[in-house]
Amino acid sequence: MDGKSAEKATLFAIALNIFLFIIKLAAGLLSGSLAVLSDALNSFLDIFSYIIAYASVRLSSQGPDKDHPFGHRRAEPLSAILVAMFAGILAFEIFKAALENIFLGEVAISITELTFGVLIVCIAVKIGMSLFLGKEAKKHNSTSMEALSMDSRNDVFSTSIALGGIAGAFLGFPLLDDLAAILISIFIFRSAYLMAKKNIDYLMGACPDSEDIAKIWNAAESVKGIKRVGGVRAHYVGDRIHAELSIVLSKNLKASKTHQIGEKVQKAVESIERVERAFVHIDYE
């Protein structure tokens, strides 16, 4: 992973989110729209999220050391879980504020062309960010950047909801602004739940999905000289896979040849993008 390039991409995303937060906050305060303010708070959370991601990208790019023999890959899923926790808290606060507006009295709202313009600009920027971060995530194989790309894509949807809310308020239906804020809070909470679930699996050493197991199995079987693959076990170490394989060889092979085949199987499996380590156990017919 090119750590410096990933760090620059994340810093660029942080700068853009600071810009979006400022213009959304200004538009929300000037208009009194809870939907726009909720979206601004969502952007503030993005800033916090991206800073954590930046720190985790730097940490996870460090190689193994004495205290961390398998590297620092758990830093990225840990950062994603922290982001998910704060997102859940934010979603609850937005939901509560919207209900208070609905049941305790509506807040005066003043929607202008500027309010619409700000949200349209934000949607355009977030579409670009999602595409850019998605490309960088694949390039660097980074779960943090993948999460940020997904978050940017989700922000397009949440800002579109806010845009619909202020459109309703502009047309004389201020209740739609509060309903839009409630939808945004539910959307944020759902994204937080999915992010937490995925990254908890990484930290708990869950088994990869069947597609990854099949790739490992096929990579081992492609090596000439083995009779069959006896079994494959794999688990996550951070966001990378460690695999344990049992291969069956002919008992007539020399020790040097079996060792050579075992190394080839290891290299074949470790050539898979998400596999960091492969441990090969040799059995004989």
Image (cartoon, grey):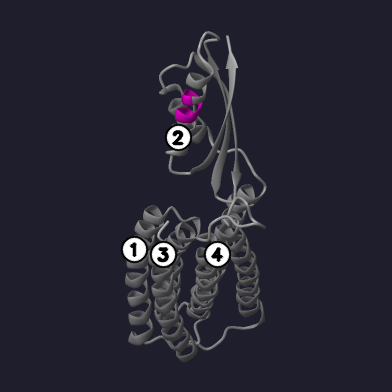
Location of mark 1 (residue): 132
**Disc 2 to disc 1, C-alpha distance:** 32 Å
Q: Closest to the observer: 265 or 188?
A: 265
Q: Earlier in the sequence, mark 2 or mark 1?
A: 1
Q: What crowding class fits label 3: few (fewer than 14 Cα within 10 Å), some (14-19), or many (20 or more)?
A: many
Tell me the quarter of the picture where residue 172 sits: bottom left
Location of mark 3 (residue): 6
**Disc 3 to disc 2, C-alpha distance:** 26 Å
Q: Residue at x 37, y 75 (%)?
A: 122
Magenta segment boundaries in residue numbering? 260-265
Q: Secondary structure at mark 3?
A: helix
Closer to the observer: label 3 or label 2?
2
Q: Earlier in the sequence, mark 4 or mark 1?
A: 4
**Disc 4 to disc 1, C-alpha distance:** 22 Å
**Disc 4 to disc 2, C-alpha distance:** 26 Å
Amino acid type of the residue that numbered disc 2 sits on in the rendered structure = Lys
Position of the C terminus, as image quadrant, is top right
Left or right relative to 142: residue 194 = right
Q: Position of residue 11 (x, y in %)?
A: 43, 74
Q: Secondary structure at mark 1?
A: helix
Location of mark 4 (residue): 59
Tell me the quarter of the picture where residue 120 sits: bottom left
**Magenta highlight: main SS:** helix
Location of mark 2 (residue): 267
Q: What crowding class fits label 4: few (fewer than 14 Cα within 10 Å), some (14-19), or many (20 or more)?
A: some
Q: Residue at x 61, y 72 (%)?
A: 90
Q: Earlier in the sequence, mark 3 or mark 4?
A: 3
Q: Secondary structure at mark 4?
A: helix
Amino acid type of the residue that numbered disc 3 sits on in the rendered structure = Ala
Is there any visible trace of residue 152 in the rendered image?
Answer: yes
